[in-house]
Amino acid sequence: MGLFSKDIATLHDLYVHQLQDVYYAEQQITKALPKMIDKATAPELRGGFETHLRETEGQIARLEQVFALEGLAAKGVTCPAIDGIIKEANEVAGDIADKAVLDAALTAAAQAVEHYEISRYGTLIAWAEQLGRDEAAQILRETLAEEKATDEALTKLAAGGLNRRAEMADG
């Protein structure tokens, strides 16, 4: 198959692998967000990214709690999906000269990250519940709620003016 390692034989194995995947993803996001903060020009977008950076640090701490509940050390496994999303965001942002258009692109890139995280946390919660890991599921729900709130805030920023400013840049 090749999609997952041979060590994944049970739902629990898959659950742990997915925890490692999202742990890696959150680590990469904490590296990418300061660059996005530096590139963003709209104060409200910069502020949103700064808030989400602090939230992401808390999300990493929560994942470490979940690993501890499993009796495991927190560790990540390379996540090609988040690497690709971040790479694409960097490439697109590097090609945009107009600051208003750049802000719209950064918002879209951040939403791609949020949607990835929402899908991962939703799956982890379902698996945790199936495996009887109710405490872990509750911890993961906190993070899922933050991810959804961030996505909603990004949508409001985009619809509330960022996209309009980008459109006006077209002339």
Image (tube, rainbow, N blue to C red):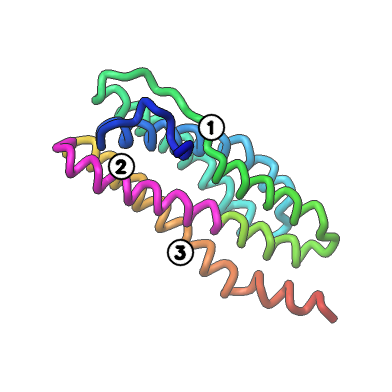
What label sits on residue 152 in the rendered view? 3
What label sits on residue 140 in the rendered view? 2
Identify which amino acid the numbered label 2 is placed on.
Leu
Image quadrant where one finds the N terminus: top left
Residue 54, how many percent across, how many down?
A: 50, 39
Identify which amino acid the numbered label 1 is placed on.
Thr
Q: Earlier in the sequence, mark 2 or mark 3?
A: 2
Badge 2: few (under 14), some or many (20 or more) residues near its Cα, within 10 Å?
A: many
Residue 105, how many percent across, how many down?
A: 69, 61
Magenta range is: 111-133
Q: Nearer the viewer, residue 159 or 141?
A: 141
Q: Is residue 140 left or right of residue 119?
A: left
Residue 109, how many percent across, how many down?
A: 62, 56
Q: Which residue lies under the disc numbered 1? A: 78
Q: In the picture shown, does residue 22 fall above or below 73?
A: below
In the image, what residue occupies the spot 65% across and 69% down? 162
Query: Label 1's element?
Result: loop
Please, which residue is most extreme toward the left here? 132
Q: In the picture shown, does residue 104 fall above or below 121?
A: below
